[in-house]
Image: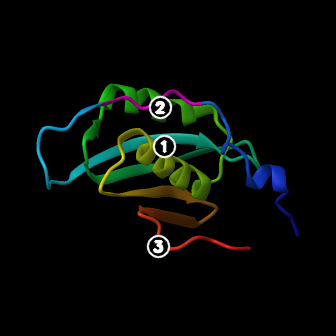
């Protein structure tokens, strides 16, 4: 049985990525959905490429995400070794840090590998803190 090391489990979480740009929001009370159908990253355990669709849904506060900067940020994952769960949660944390939304969610729907398809969704505000 193969075990995942602590290093593999944390892979990609501290990697330096391009900053997500923002611009001032002009309207209250609406939702933005951004779909990125060509997301790619690398499995830190096998080194094989992962493919999927990332959907970012958020209600902006005072700032909106700038799409060109978001694209550059997402493209930086292409050569990054990171598990699906970490990628989705990292994207959420970086989106929240950049634009401080009223609420947000990031959904990763990853292509099947080895007959298994994974869908990961993370939401802000977080429901509760994780304690190990």
Residue 89 coordinates in the image, percent (x, y): 53, 55
Residue 85 included in the magenta stretch of the image:
no
Label 3: few (<14), some (14–19) or many (≥20) C-alpha neighbours in 10 Å: few
* Residue 122: percent from left, percent from top: 46, 62
116 relative to 95 in the view: left or right: right
Q: Nearer the viewer, mark 3 or mark 2?
A: 3
Label located before the other in sequence (1 or 2): 2
* Residue 22 tag number: none
- CB under 8 Å between callouts 3 and 2? no
Q: Which residues lie in the magenta part?
A: 17-22
- In three-dimensional space, the C-alpha distance between marks 3 and 2, rounded to whole angstroms, equals 26 Å
Residue pointed to by mark 2: 73
Query: For the residue labelled by badge 3, is the local secondary structure a helix, a strand or a loop?
Result: loop
Residue depicted at x 64% and y 62% = 114
Q: Position of residue 2 (x, y in %)?
A: 86, 64
Asked whether, in this view, residue 71 is left or right of residue 6, the answer is left
In space, the residues marked 1 and 2 are separated at their CA atoms by 10 Å
- Mark closest to the chain's N terminus, 3 or 2: 2
Outermost residue toward the left? 27
């Amino acid at each position: 049985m193969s075990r995942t090391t602590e290093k593999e489990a944390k892979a990609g979480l501290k990697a330096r990525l391009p900053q997500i740009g923002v611009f001032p929001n002009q309207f209250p009370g609406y939702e933005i959905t951004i779909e990125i159908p060509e997301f790619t990253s690398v499995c830190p355990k096998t080194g094989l490429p992962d493919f999927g669709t990332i959907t970012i849904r958020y209600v902006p506060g005072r700032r909106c995400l700038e799409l060109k900067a978001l694209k550059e940020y997402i493209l930086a994952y292409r050569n990054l070794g990171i598990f699906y769960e970490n990628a989705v949660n990292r994207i959420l944390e970086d989106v929240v840090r950049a634009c401080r939304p009223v609420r947000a969610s990031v959904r990763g729907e990853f292509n099947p590998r080895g007959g298994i398809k994974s869908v990961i969704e993370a939401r802000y505000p977080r429901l509760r803190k994780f304690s190990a």
